């Protein structure tokens, strides 16, 4: 496993990050996502946001949190390291969360221009939605099934943009 720690950031080979993500989603038959959300942002679940958690924090939780103790014997040290690597990669990116539901308020989030960020969109409706990502210079539409969550990584633009779905808006504000 190629792993270099520097100033609390962890850099890993891309396929190792994919292994960590797979473990995060599937370990123990239900994965960490069951409590911490698909993208480790908490997602309104009982486990809360664990993006950027350290190995020490992860091990402490495995030993002391009753629901996580179930995974303690299942995860070998290398697997723990891979999951923490994945969490570090998520923690290194600014998180933009947007929940689409009944609320029609405009949400706003401040971004740092030209920084890799992650947009996590939760569809709290009972119908599929489509989010046009072209304002983020991404030539794709994010399709999200009812009560599901999807994410996309993007480079924050050098100017403020707005995303809109079903009368709801997310303003991504950039200091211009």
Image (cartoon, helix red, strand yellow):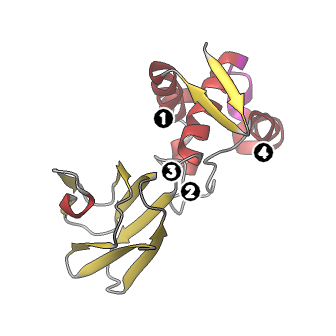
Q: Are marks 4 and 2 in contact (CB under 8 Å)?
A: no
Q: Is residue 80 visible?
A: yes
Q: Which mark is residue 37?
A: 3
Q: Residue furthest front?
A: 176
Q: Are marks 3 and 4 in contact (CB under 8 Å)?
A: no
First in residue order: circle 4 vs circle 2: 2
For the point 75% across and 33% down, which residue is it? 55
Q: Which residues are magenta?
A: 70-77
For the point 64% across and 45% down, which residue is it? 52
Q: Is residue 128 visible?
A: no
Left or right: 61 with respect to 80? right
Mark 3 residue element: loop
Along the viewing direction, whichever of 171 and 75 lies nearer the viewer: 171
Q: Viewer-nearest of labels 1 and 4?
A: 1
Left or right: 98 with respect to 73? left
Residue tagged 1: 25
Q: Are marks 3 and 2 in contact (CB under 8 Å)?
A: yes
Q: Are marks 1 and 4 in contact (CB under 8 Å)?
A: no
Q: Quadrant of the N terminus?
A: top right
Residue tagged 4: 65
Across and down, in percent, residue 12 comes to 56, 24
For the point 38% across and 69% down, which residue is it? 99
| Alpha carbons under labels 1 and 4: distance apart | 19 Å
Magenta span contains residue 11: no
Q: Quadrant of the C terminus?
A: bottom left
Residue tagged 2: 42
First in residue order: circle 2 vs circle 1: 1
First in residue order: circle 3 vs circle 4: 3
First in residue order: circle 3 vs circle 2: 3
Q: Viewer-nearest of labels 3 and 4?
A: 3
């Amino acid at each position: 496993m190629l792993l270099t720690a520097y100033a609390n950031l962890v850099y890993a080979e891309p396929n190792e990050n994919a292994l960590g993500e797979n473990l995060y989603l599937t370990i123990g038959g239900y994965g960490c996502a069951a409590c911490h959300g698909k993208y480790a942002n908490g997602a309104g679940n009982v486990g809360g946001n664990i993006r950027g958690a350290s190995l020490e924090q992860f091990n402490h939780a495995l030993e002391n949190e009753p629901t996580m103790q179930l995974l303690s014997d299942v995860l070998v040290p290398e697997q723990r390291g891979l999951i923490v690597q994945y969490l570090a990669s998520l923690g290194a990116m600014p998180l933009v969360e947007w929940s689409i539901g009944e609320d029609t308020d405009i949400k706003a989030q401040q971004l740092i221009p030209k920084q890799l960020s992650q947009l996590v969109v939760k569809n709290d409706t009972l119908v599929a939605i489509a989010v046009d990502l072209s304002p983020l210079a991404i030539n794709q539409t994010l399709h999200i099934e009812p009560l599901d969550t999807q994410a996309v990584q993007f480079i924050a633009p050098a100017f403020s943009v707005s995303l809109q779905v079903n009368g709801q808006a997310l303003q991504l504000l950039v200091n211009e």
